Image: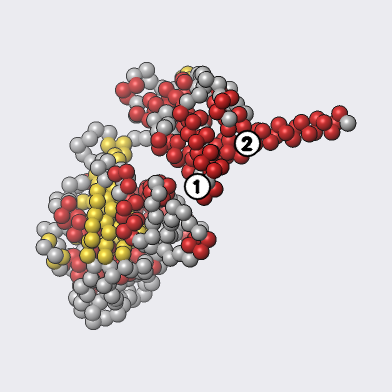
Amino acid sequence: MAHRLHAKVQFAAIDGIKNWVNEDPKTRVMIVLDHKQKILNMRYREGQVDYFGKKGMSLLGTMIIEGVTNVPNVTWSYKFVDYIVKGYTGEDVLQVCSVITEILRRVSEHMPDITDICLQSDNASCFASQDHIPYIYLLNKESHGPIIVKSHGPMIVKWIFTEAQTGRGRLDTHFSYVNMLLQSYIEGGNDILTEDDIFNALTYNYGIYGSTAVLLDASNLIGPVFDNKETFKVKGMGSRETHEISWLHNCVHVIASSNITEPVIVKNTTLSHYKKKDLCFTVEKESTSQKEAKLRKTTTTTNLEVSNDESNMSRKASAYLNALSNLDTKVFPSDNNTVEIQQEVLVHTFFTYPWAVYVYPHKLDESSSNNVYKKLSELYNIGSIHKSRKFSPDAALRTIVDSIIHDKWDQRIVLTVPKIKAFFQNKDKKKHKQRRKQMGKQRR
């Protein structure tokens, strides 16, 4: 119960921070941090020894949330920066401090009007460590490279932590797209064995919408974070108890529960005793996708509104309705003005014929034959001839969607992995043989 209350309190505080960003979107920004699950080596053709003898590579993803004022009915803009750390596999305080240092530099360079930054993350030990309190205090004061991070530059003013296992966010969704891009890179005949390969994979096919890939060389990164002291601890509060940290002008507030408990005050005189270590890392290369960042509308509804004017619909909604009409599905408004669909849905004959038929191209019906048939037959034949190049149903579906039916929603709706699996396995042909055997036994 306490876990759920903590989660509710923190999400309410996050909503308040978003309102704070929206009050002055030109100078304020919110950045969400999280580690992606470690990326393992992947090969286009992989043996058993290669599969089991793997070591993970680290990727720390960030999501930049900006307020939008110049676009009607749009409140937020989401951009993603993925930091691939090369030469340092530990996901600890030292790695996070290095990435935070680079975040400040990038904000100064690419978003010069921003003065206040709020960070958000879960309370994993690498994020919730109290060593970040003096480090960020010193980082806000000192210069970093050619850019001075002082009163006129960006400063980290708050860091808010969420409870573990409180649901997935947009950054997790971004990580799922990263996985898809990595798999697509592999299926293109490439291998992912080093951090450089991960960078190349994230820039494959122009990357992901609104994302940037940054390769950090941390081969010479050595701890600890401070030169003169090992760690920092707040009296009377552990790192996992901390849910919010605020860096003010003359002190730092450490809070156990946002907007509920009284803060533990850490004076700047205490923090000034720490000497920040110059972390040795460099930006080896970076690449920003040519695809623009996604914008989030102010109001969203779960039901699809019926309108005769398709210009008021999103492109996907319009394409979806068009696909439904191609499937001979009737769409009509109900009493609450939402879309309803008849239970009996007529789909294209290609997806209802016995799948075993399509293994033999000469038996195809000319009226329903299309590029999807040919591609499925091609993939099936490749796997039959070359066992090492056999396509799984998931890989076949991704290949067909990417190359043939990317914008054909009528076929994407009904073409599924189980149906492709049935096609590859000739299940209908096998069932037909089993039925004939059963009928023969009954006659005897």
Q: Does the rendering let one see residue 89?
A: yes
On screen, residue 229 above or below 205: below
Q: Does the rendering let one see residue 259?
A: no
What label sits on residue 426 in the rendered view? 2
Name the residue rendered at 14%, 51% in the picture. Answer: 113
Q: In this orientation, which residue lies closer to the viewer: 98 or 76? A: 98
Name the residue rendered at 62%, 32% in the picture. Answer: 356
Which SS class for mark 2?
Answer: loop
Q: Position of residue 234 (x, y in %)?
A: 32, 74
Name the residue rendered at 60%, 37% in the picture. Answer: 422
Q: In this orientation, which residue lies closer to the viewer: 165 or 111? A: 111
Toward the front, the furthest residue is 385
Looking at marks 2 and 1 on the same chain, the residue that comes earlier in the sequence is marked by 1
Q: Position of residue 87 (x, y in %)?
A: 31, 68
Residue at mark 1: 389
Q: Amino acid at mark 2?
A: Asn
Q: Position of residue 236 (x, y in %)?
A: 36, 75
335 on left or right of 203: right
